[in-house]
């Protein structure tokens, strides 16, 4: 079930993602702000689609984490994340999110720029695995690309996103190539569809807490 989602060379990921994704650093700060409000003590955290381990590096400097498990489908990403984060509280594991074996272990599960790479059935399977991995009352935080509700909105939002990338150092050709991946290499759904899917997967509380460009932050409680 391996799925290679990132368009970037792994060694260049951290530099290139900032040119491609508006408010990349802010995404992690938003998550930190939410988790801080929970006032958890010595808790367990699962980060799916961990990439180069930025969520782990950010969280470990702030929270009293008992254990943090970071998974990614790409072994090369896992290797790079491990090289950046040498901490006995963190474990890195090559694993497809749709094959997670965990049941009621984690207090927090995060999925950053993961779900939009799945079509609907796969997305539901992935979210259900995250739901199962959470303890009762556990928190799931997702950031993903979303689809506007109209074709006019799609065109407007994609053009804005393209101009952001050019302004941040991409050539016109590079920006065009990235934008052309919409609906071809990743499959965003509307915000209302995202929240409905989370509820269908069993979450009792689902709320939007952040929206910018074509990215949305969603908070759900089991």
Image (cartoon, grey):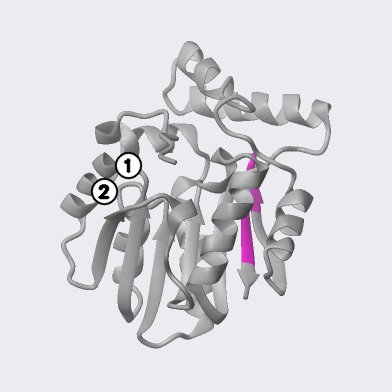
Residue 184 percent across, percent down from the top left: 60, 24
- What secondary structure prevails in the magenta region? strand
Q: CA distance from mark 1 to mark 2?
A: 7 Å
Quadrant containing the N terminus is top left
Please say whether residue 218 is one of the residues in the magenta stretch. yes
Crowd around label 1: few <14 · some 14–19 · many ≥20 (10 Å)? many
Crowd around label 2: few <14 · some 14–19 · many ≥20 (10 Å)? many
Q: Quadrant of residue 197?
A: bottom right
Q: In the rendered image, is residue 76 in sight?
A: yes
Task: Please tell me the numbered disc located at residue 78.
Answer: 2
Task: Please tell me the numbered disc located at residue 169.
Answer: none
Label 2 sits on a secondary structure element that is helix
Q: Quadrant of residue 205?
A: bottom right
Q: Is residue 153 shown above or below 102?
A: above
Q: In the rendered image, is residue 27 in sight?
A: no
The answer to whether the residues at label 1 and label 2 have Cβ atoms under 8 Å apart is: yes
Residue 103 percent across, percent down from the top left: 47, 74
Is 60 situated left or right of 3 in this image? left
Query: What range of the chain is rendered magenta?
Result: 211-219
Q: Is residue 10 shown above or below 218?
A: above
Image point (16%, 62%), residue name = 86
Q: Nearer the viewer, residue 175 or 125?
A: 125
Q: Nearer the viewer, residue 147 or 91?
A: 91
Label 1 sits on a secondary structure element that is loop
Is 183 situated left or right of 191 in this image? left
Residue 114 percent across, percent down from the top left: 51, 47
Please say whether residue 92 is one of the residues in the magenta stretch. no
Image point (44%, 55%), residue name = 99
Residue 10 percent across, percent down from the top left: 29, 35
Q: Which residue is mark 1?
A: 74
Quadrant containing the C terminus is bottom right
């Amino acid at each position: 079930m391996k799925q290679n989602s990132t368009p970037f060379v792994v060694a260049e990921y951290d530099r290139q993602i900032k040119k491609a994704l508006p408010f990349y650093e802010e995404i992690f700060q938003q998550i930190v702000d939410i988790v801080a409000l929970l006032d958890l003590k010595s808790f367990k955290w699962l980060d799916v689609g961990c990439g180069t381990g930025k969520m782990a590096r950010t969280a470990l400097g702030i929270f009293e984490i008992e254990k943090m498990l970071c998974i990614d489908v790409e072994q090369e990403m896992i290797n790079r994340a491990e090289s950046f984060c040498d901490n006995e509280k963190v474990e890195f594991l090559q694993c497809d999110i749709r094959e997670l074996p965990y049941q009621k272990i984690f207090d927090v599960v995060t999925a950053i720029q993961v779900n939009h790479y799945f079509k609907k059935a796969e997305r539901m399977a992935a979210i259900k695995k995250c739901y199962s991995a959470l303890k009762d009352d556990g928190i799931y935080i997702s950031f993903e690309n979303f689809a506007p509700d109209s074709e006019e909105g799609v065109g407007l939002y994609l053009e804005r996103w393209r101009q952001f990338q050019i302004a941040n150092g991409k050539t016109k050709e590079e920006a065009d190539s990235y934008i052309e991946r919409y609906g071809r290499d990743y499959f965003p759904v509307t915000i209302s569809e995202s929240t409905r899917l989370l509820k269908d997967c069993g979450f009792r509380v689902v709320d939007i807490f952040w929206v910018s460009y074509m990215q949305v932050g969603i908070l759900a409680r089991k």
